[in-house]
Image (tube, rainbow, N blue to C red):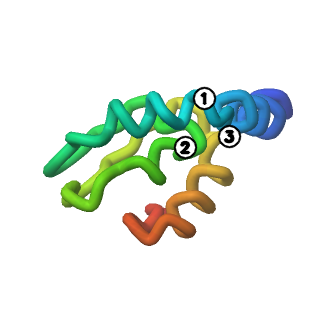
């Protein structure tokens, strides 16, 4: 995997999808989520802040391993779930 995929793309994606106007949509979409969640295309973990406390487990999948550094930091900071090694 090249430099763009590992380093540049994850940060560019995180920055572009962190815009405040998108936060409203994340909050609306995830407000009623309960139980166990499978998030495909987890990316850098931007949805974590919007999951309600009613969820029991989040399983995440992302095809780009370059996203892991940012996602694992966000997971650790969230207190919701712990990252897998």
- C-alpha distance separating marks 3 and 1: 25 Å
Residue 60: x %, y % from top left: 39, 44
Q: Name the image quarter holding the N terminus.
A: top right
Say which element carries label 3. Answer: helix
Label ID, residue 84:
none
Tell me the element at label 2.
loop
Query: Where on the picture, by quarter, is residue 11?
Result: top right
Residue 39 appears in which quarter of the rendering?
A: top left
From the viewer's perspective, tell me whether residue 36 is left or right of residue 25: left
Circle 3: is it few (<14), some (14-19), or many (20+) Cα within 10 Å?
A: many
With 29 as the anchor, is 37 left or right in this view? left
Instruction: Tell me the residue that label 1 is attached to.
Output: 21
Residue found at x 59% / y 43%: 44
Pointer 3: what residue?
66
Residue 81 spot, x, y in % from top left: 38, 65
Q: Position of residue 47 (x, y in %)?
A: 47, 43
Q: Earlier in the sequence, mark 2 or mark 3?
A: 2
Nearest the viewer among 22 and 79 is 22
Of badges 3 and 1, nearer the viewer stands: 1
- Which of the two labelled residues, at mark 2 and mark 1, occupies the earlier sequence position? 1
Foreground mark, 2 or 1, reads: 1
Which of 67/37 is in front? 37
CA distance for labels 2 and 1: 13 Å
Residue at 52 percent of width and 30 percent of height? 63
Q: What's the residue at 22%, 55% (across, down)?
A: 55
Which residue is labeled 2 in the image? 46
């Amino acid at each position: 995997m090249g430099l763009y995929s590992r380093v540049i793309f994850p940060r560019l994606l995180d920055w572009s999808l962190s815009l405040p106007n998108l936060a409203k949509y994340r909050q609306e979409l995830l407000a009623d989520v309960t139980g166990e969640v499978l998030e495909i295309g987890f990316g850098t973990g931007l949805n974590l802040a919007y999951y309600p406390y009613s969820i029991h487990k989040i399983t995440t999948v992302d095809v780009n391993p370059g996203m892991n550094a940012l996602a694992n930091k966000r997971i650790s900071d969230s207190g919701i779930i712990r990252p897998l090694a």
